[in-house]
Amino acid sequence: MCGLFTTGVTVITTGSEGEADGTTVNSFTSVSLEPPLVLFCLHRQSRLHTLLTESGGFTVNFLSGRQQSLARHFAERRPDMLAGVPHHYTADGLPVLSEALAHLTCTTVDVHTAGDHDIVVGEVVDLGAPEPGREPLIFFDGSLGPLRTGANRFHHAAPDAPATARQAS
């Protein structure tokens, strides 16, 4: 059922130039505007978990609709995930995917254990603005794809139409 909830797709990166890594995450959300806080969930046995603890920060890289292969790449488990992927480092040494739609650089401020995952809360300390005209990558019902933008992207039923009429449109 949770797969029927549409989400954006991000790659969380952390580490330093000596040892950096990333993983695909769709459990990302904004928490607060003041201070600017975000969170994501990370399996405690994840390859990224130790690096995240050591670095004290992370980058949220928002993927564009044309970066499905990048999302799949970072969902795999293999060493040296950033090899061959265009990236650069922030002044604090955190890796950023150079071709991401946009990015947030964060300092880890809290970690909460929840089952086999940790809920990682970060304060946004810097951001990279998106390129205009690019569509985000979304995840729905087990599939990745671009969010189609433009005037014809939604089909609206009348507000008082029965549910069956709305479903048919």
Image: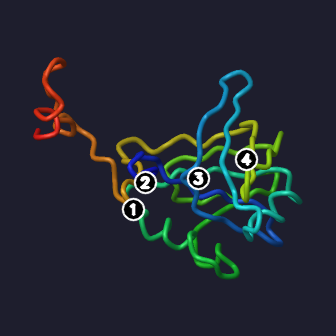
Residue at 73% x, 59% y: name it.
Answer: 116
Query: At label 2, which amino acid type do we have?
Result: Gly
- Say which label, 1 or 4, has the lower sequence index: 4
User: Circle 2: is it few (<14), some (14-19), or many (20+) Cα within 10 Å?
Assistant: few
Q: Quadrant of the C terminus?
A: top left
Give the CA separation, mark 4 to mark 2: 19 Å
Q: Please give the residue where the numbered disc 4 appears in the rendered image.
A: 119
- Say which label, 3 or 4, has the lower sequence index: 3
- Say which label, 2 or 3, has the lower sequence index: 2
Residue at 51% x, 59% y: name it.
Answer: 99
- Choose mark 3 or mark 4, whichever is in front: 4
Quarter residue 126 falls in: top right
Q: Secondary structure at mark 2?
A: helix
- Choose mark 2 or mark 3, whichever is in front: 2
Q: Please give the residue where the numbered disc 2 appears in the rendered image.
A: 3
- Choose mark 1 or mark 3, whichever is in front: 1
Tell me if 93 is positioned left or right of 126 in this view: right
Return the x and y of residue 79 as percentages of the image width and height: 70, 81
User: Circle 4: is it few (<14), some (14-19), or many (20+) Cα within 10 Å?
Assistant: some
Return the x and y of residue 89 as percentages of the image width and height: 72, 59
**Mark seen at residue 142:** 1
Residue lying furthest bottom: 79
Query: At label 3, which amino acid type do we have?
Result: Asn
Query: At label 1, which amino acid type do we have?
Result: Gly
Give the CA separation, mark 3 to mark 4: 18 Å
Query: CB under 8 Å between callouts 1 and 2?
Result: yes
Q: Is residue 39 above or below residue 82?
A: above
Q: Please give the residue where the numbered disc 3 appears in the rendered image.
A: 61
Q: Secondary structure at mark 3?
A: strand
